[in-house]
Amino acid sequence: MLPTESKKALSFKRCIEDGDLVIVYERHDVMKPVKVTKDGVLQNRFGFYRHSDWIGKPLGTKVLSNKGKFVYLLAPTPELWTLVLSHRTQILYIADISFVVMYLEVVPGCVVLESGTGSGSLSTSLARAVAPTGHVYSFDFHEQRAVCAREDFEKTGISSLVTVEVRDIQGQGFPEKLSSLADSVFLDLPQPWLAVPSAAKMLKEDGVLCSFSPCIEQVQRTCEVLRSDFIEIRTFEVLLRTYEVKEMKVETGAMIGESHDEEDNGGQRPSKRKHISNDDGYAISQDNSSSATSVVMARPCSEARGHTGYLTFARLQCLS
């Protein structure tokens, strides 16, 4: 996410400056965060890139190495930051994050409580959602993780939107100073049911709570506790299926189909075709009698991410 100062508007059009954080994009699965310094140099398999050549260029620029190879310089958006951040804990990914932000009804100006902070993946997206006038209060019982999270938020320019504190929410609950101030609460804890009573006190009327748990037994115990103060209790599992799209060479006859082949051959059965798979696993039909043509083919990604966790949402019951 870009810095929130007025002189640096939240826009992809602004130019790179000395001290900025950018995402160096080689390909969709090879990216890294880099802090730009006027004397800095980035080295990779494509050669070396001088940071001084980057300063003054707009984000999204394609820059060349000494060998003529290129990378892209992208803004550290929450989506990209989730893919490149240091994993201090297991993190939430884009599919779960987008679902959480929508179902927690997070909009600009909201106050959101989060426990625990972890690697800060969700915190970054929450900060963008509540900007410019809202705030995220994030808690983690592990002091070193909290320190690292603060440093990351400074790098990504959202430190004014996120406050990180060291606190055991399961044992101590949320601070009383935040009572009835939160629009929504997010729990990512081993025993979330222990924090539910405190979370209920923090929420405004009609506020929404979300609990993320990897095991269904955790969900069951949390739902039992939620029934006392919450309504509209729902649990979801988000499964994302990614497709790879590539341009391939295939024979024309395979695209037309055997029925047309029979007409072209005077009603005779078509000749046998040899089917092989290329190195990427795409099925390709070979027939010396047909000419090859380029087509765009798609298939499910072989490394699709499976189960991550269950998302349980509930709305605070209004007593009036």
Image (tube, helix red, strand yellow):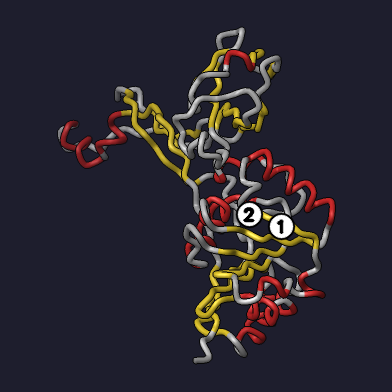
Q: Residue at x 63, y 54 (%)?
A: 123
Front one among 123 and 249 = 123
Mark earlier in primary sequence (2, 1): 1
Measured from the top left, where is residue 137 in percent x and y? 66, 61
Measured from the top left, where is residue 207 in percent x and y? 53, 75
Question: To which residue does mark 2 refer?
Answer: 123
Q: Secondary structure at mark 2?
A: helix
Residue 117 disc label: 1
Q: Mark 1: few, some, or many residues within 10 Å (few <14, many ≥20)?
A: many
Q: Is residue 125 left or right of residue 85?
A: left
The N terminus: image quadrant: top right
Picture layout, residue 254 above or below residue 294: below
Q: Mark 2: few, some, or many residues within 10 Å (few <14, many ≥20)?
A: many
Q: Residue at x 55, y 22 (%)?
A: 71
Q: Residue at x 68, y 79 (%)?
A: 196
Picture layout, residue 249 above or below residue 112: above
Front one among 230 and 39 = 39
> What's under tag 1, amino acid-wise?
Thr
Measured from the top left, where is residue 203 in percent x and y? 59, 76
Res. 266 visible in picture: yes
Front one among 77 and 135 = 135
Count of residue discs? 2
* Res 285 → quadrant: top left
> What's under tag 2, amino acid-wise?
Ser
Measured from the top left, where is residue 308 in percent x and y? 63, 60
Alpha-carbon distance for marks 2 and 1?
7 Å
Q: Is residue 139 left or right of residue 295?
A: right
Picture layout, residue 50 above or below residue 199: above
